[in-house]
Image (spheres, coloured by chain):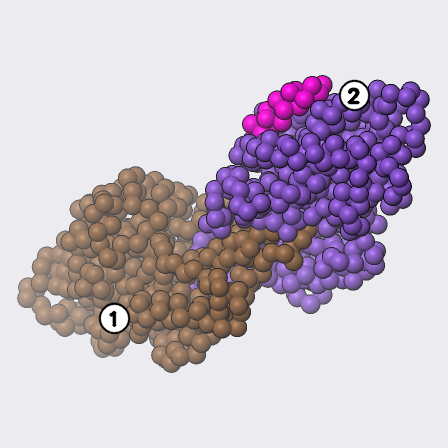
Chain colours: A purple, B brown
Amino acid sequence: MPDIQKRINQWIKDHREEGTNLLQKMVQAPSTQGNEAGAQAIVAQKLQEMGLQIDSWEPDGSELKKHSYFYSPRSEFSNSPNVVGIMKGTGGGRSIILNGHIDVVPDGDRDQWDDDPYSGAIKNGRMFGRGVTDMKGGNVSLILAMQALKENGIQLKGDVIFQSVIEEESGGAGTLAAVLRGYKADAALIPEPTNMRIFPKQQGSMWFRIHVKGRSAHGGTRYEGVSAIEKSMTVINHIRALEEKRNARISDPLYQNTPIPIPINLGVIEGGNWPSSVPDLVKVEGRMGVAPEETMEQAKDEMAAWLLKLGEADQWFKENPPVLEWFGARWVPGSIDVEHELMNALVHQYRQVAGQDPVIEASPWGTDGGLLTHVGETPAIVFGPGVTEVAHYPNEYILLDNVFSTAEIIALTLIQWCGMETEQDGVTQSGTRETILGNGN
Amino acid sequence: MPDIQKRINQWIKDHREEGTNLLQKMVQAPSTQGNEAGAQAIVAQKLQEMGLQIDSWEPDGSELKKHSYFYSPRSEFSNSPNVVGIMKGTGGGRSIILNGHIDVVPDGDRDQWDDDPYSGAIKNGRMFGRGVTDMKGGNVSLILAMQALKENGIQLKGDVIFQSVIEEESGGAGTLAAVLRGYKADAALIPEPTNMRIFPKQQGSMWFRIHVKGRSAHGGTRYEGVSAIEKSMTVINHIRALEEKRNARISDPLYQNTPIPIPINLGVIEGGNWPSSVPDLVKVEGRMGVAPEETMEQAKDEMAAWLLKLGEADQWFKENPPVLEWFGARWVPGSIDVEHELMNALVHQYRQVAGQDPVIEASPWGTDGGLLTHVGETPAIVFGPGVTEVAHYPNEYILLDNVFSTAEIIALTLIQWCGMETEQDGVTQSGTRETILGNGN
């Protein structure tokens, strides 16, 4: 094991407790939409202690709204700050953005949680809590990686820009605000929960709402009306068929292990206002996956055309076509060349630390990587320690071991990508690389 | 046409405009749950002008709650008064309760209304507005019937107790309060919207809520979760099958023209809280029809047992059985002997006025008649001018002609049932009857 890897590895072993406490504190600060300030304060304080240069600000909604990539259910972000910490390089190296979101989704039906959703309870190597996997665990990996370099006196040549952003779960307004503030880099890394798989491609997605009409009537003579609930069941089955059709087209080998590469999720249903009345309106809200190969517009058009087909089989839908609207969140699909230098560095250091080849796939969900790629001109890789399957679940958890090995992999990747300042001046990038990698792969 | 019928008929002809204006004023006072005071004030003032003895009071929720037949989503009725007007008889006749509810259901999706839901607009013989058919039109028929007797100097022997009650649409707390205040009679008439059909039997009904569980997951990996929306579709189809099963049993000839004698209506659906999450809980609220022959308990038990069957076909339901609860509104089934004297009087006067036989059926919905029958020991007939098909609909309307012919039929029925005071004392009931009915049937 090369000397530097040994030192990083040892330092992280020695700081497991410190990292665990930091993660626990972050989980215990519930940072659902609008309530991010508490968790961000913890992050900012930590970065300050590490001697990073801090930039914390509340995004200006009125400015953001002018941008075509802005999507959020709100446009007022006071008390919802972004936090950026900059680890300035000595120059001459490649820069990187380390991006993680601080916002978490609601905890849902509390009865399904064994502990309080914000307990941060630890049980045989797992920490539990809303957001621990998506994605505060990944954020802690980033922070530990930077701290490990700092405290081992390792000076990087390229700048490291750490971003703790709001709003990822509802459209990426936090990352958009960071891009518009001027933050760019040669590449980016986002430690979303990938089970430590490496995602060079990220699926896009957007939110839709479908209004399904019925005709009201007294429940006792319900046969005189048309139930919007029953009609919405037809619409839902129709959307299932569209999902099948769209996924049958996906041939990208990066998706080969994904049961449904680009799912259409129906997340919210609401209709009717009186148990004894036939409901005349049902609203269904959902999230449509967008393939890295297609545009948002193509996906929208396909959904709209598909819904129109309902009128062919059913006179009611012909006279009362479901109304489709796109609202709120939207994640742009993103990608990086699988042969990109940051990919090579990450894959190499993964092998060094994990002692095996990484799984390389396309992400089953949208991330802020799309905004970094398309608006920030910063190609992004998604790679993180979280457990994909429990993101947005009750009893969300993370394996603490993975938080620390991810930190180690990222620390070494930063050295390889940004370059390290050594005694001998003017050492070349590749030269630097050898000192890190020791005798070959 | 007997002399008295002529006089009543003429008086009502002469007072169409007055009756129309009263109905319009009542419709323009929206009396949804909690907002009944304005419409009740109009009724009380009218009864006062007619010289009736008024009893107006706000039911005491804390008292009502102690009664096993009390059902309401609320228990606070301040500013929601009941209004009773008594037309005292001279004695020796049969008494009657004329009961109509003042509360109306919500107006639903306003886009489906051609005019404002509370316009009271009149277009070729029809008045439009929420509540005009269910059941302010019927209430106006009652008021006109009493006024016609008064202004024609016709003195009845039996008491006429007119009740304008709240809460019929959510469980009958208004009528229950009137019963508990001591109002009873030898029989009752309720002019709910029956299209002038006569309903000696009234279907009962009650409200239920079903909680359908799912397992939350990120929408992008929705295959890792279980959608409570998709599971609720299975539950809804299962309930449709129960409705078929229950209605296949109904053989009562009074239901022969009713497509679904005892429907199970699903009126409200609500579930999920995030478009990008797999929903973990969906709530469905509905209204179960109860046959006059069965008890509320039998119907409840059948629904509970039926839902358990879901577990036989689906492991998910076996481990996560839908949770059934009964809440809020409940209407007790009611009935009167089809050979009851009030039935004979009503049927006879219907023939006299309409010149044809009435349609006699069982009501497709619950009314306060069940409470009058079972708690008030006052058997009830449901017969009114409203258009059944538009009750609880957008663009609810009533045919004004029917309001007036119903008023005429009821006025004559009151004379026949309560008995009329004539010059010659001690005239027998049948004697009285002849003077009304003239020469024979």
Q: Is residue A40 magenta?
A: yes
Q: In this view, does B87 lie to the left or right of A162?
A: left
Height in image: B385 above or below B257? above
Amino acid under label 2?
A: Lys
Q: Residues within 10 Å of mark 1 (few under 14, many from 20)?
A: many
* Marks 2,1: beta carbons within 8 A: no
Residue A193 visible somewhere in the drawing = yes
Q: What element carries label 1?
A: loop
Name the one closer to the observer, B129 or B209: B209
Q: How far apart are marks 2 and 1 (CA)?
A: 90 Å
| Residue B336 image label | 1
Q: Residue B306, percent across and down?
A: 43, 71
In what quadrant of the picture does the N terminus of chain A appear?
Answer: top right
SS at mark 2? loop
Where residue A214 appears, as percent x and y from the top left, is 56, 58
Q: Name the residue under label 2.
A: A88
Span highlighted in magenta in the image: A34-53
Residue A346 covered by magenta stretch: no
- The residue carrying pointer 2 sits among few (fewer than 14), some (14 to 19) or many (20 or more) residues within 10 Å by Cα, namely some
**Which residue does the image show at 74% across and 32% down from the upper left?**
A7
Residue B305, quarter of the rendered image:
bottom left
Q: Comparing marks 2 and 1, which lies closer to the viewer?
A: 2
Residue at 49% in and 51% down: A112
Residue drawn at point x = 81 percent, y = 31 percent: A415
Marked residue chain, label 1? B
